[in-house]
Image: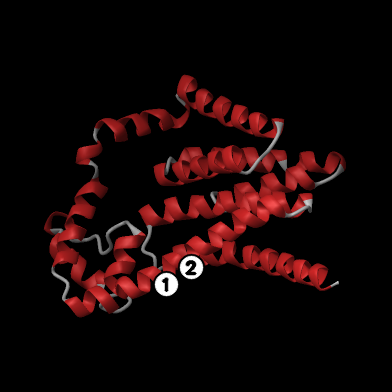
Amino acid sequence: SVLTIPAIVYSVIVTKGWYKFLFVPAVLLDLDLLLRIGSRPAILGLTVGSLFVAVFLIKGWWKWIGLLLILVGLSGLYFSGYEGVYSRFEELIVNLPKEERVYLWTASLDMLRDNSVTTWIFGSGIGNVRTVYPQYIPKMSHLIFPHLHFIEVLHDNGIVGAILLFGGLSLLFIWSIRFSKNTGDKNSRIFLQCLLVTFIGWLIHTGLTFPFYSKYSQYSLAFILGPLLAVLANKTLTLSETNSK
């Protein structure tokens, strides 16, 4: 749902004629599925991504329309109590110190403290965290990863790997924002903005829910990187050709 909602919204915006309204039920059904599942990281990721794009990338009164729609949606969840979404987030805030992930992250820091200098620099190898981590969480030894991508990558790949990986993702994120602001093609701009919503949603959702080296995270990342890199490469090529002329 997190991956497809922005893509369907893009179809609604760019499709001409009455055909665009055929995508509206798909958006509503997808949102309903997401709310019924009730995954807080998924809902949070999609909301943060939408707010980021609306505040920083959309201009004119479309910005205010986007923010109004987000506000109306959140207010509707609050007043209607639909699927208990609001109560789940309220429970999270009230019980944040006792949240399961807080315990997992604390144990993760203990795991990292036991790293050798070599392990800190180069890591212990992809997948090693799954064999080591359960030793630090005896109360929940069935969990084999820390539910935070940064900690997992830092342990498995070291500081070098973490810099290369997250540095690359950060550069890609910055380039996407820059191209979104500078491109004169309306459809490409909207497409990049929808992909950025998906990208942020992926960072938050999978980053807090799945291991980084899992099909859930990697397939989703591939779904985002494929079209994102294609658009950026095409725009770079077009810009180079224009400059050469």
Q: Is residue 213 visible?
A: no
Q: Which mark is residue 174?
A: none
Q: Nearer the viewer, residue 153 or 89?
A: 153
Residue 126 visible from this viewpoint:
yes
- Determine whether 176 is above or below 55 in the image: below
- For disc 2, the neighbor class at 10 Å (few under 14, some 14 to 19, many from 20) is few
Residue 114 location, x and y as percent? 13, 69
Label 1: which secondary element:
helix
- Residue at image position (43%, 32%) is 85
Q: How many marks?
A: 2
Image position of 170 (left or right of 177): left
Q: Report which residue position mark 1 lands on.
A: 164
Comparing 86 with 68, the one in front is: 68
Q: Quadrant of residue 17?
A: top right
* Image position, residue 191 (x, y; %): 69, 53
Query: Is 166 on the left or on the right of 100, as rendered?
Result: right
Residue 39 found in image quarter? top left
Tell me which amino acid carries mark 1. Leu
Q: Quadrant of the C terminus?
A: bottom right
Residue at the spot of label 2: 168
Q: Image point 63% across, 63% down: which residue?
A: 228
Label 1 close to label 2 by CB (< 8 Å): yes
Q: Position of residue 50 (x, y in %)?
A: 56, 41
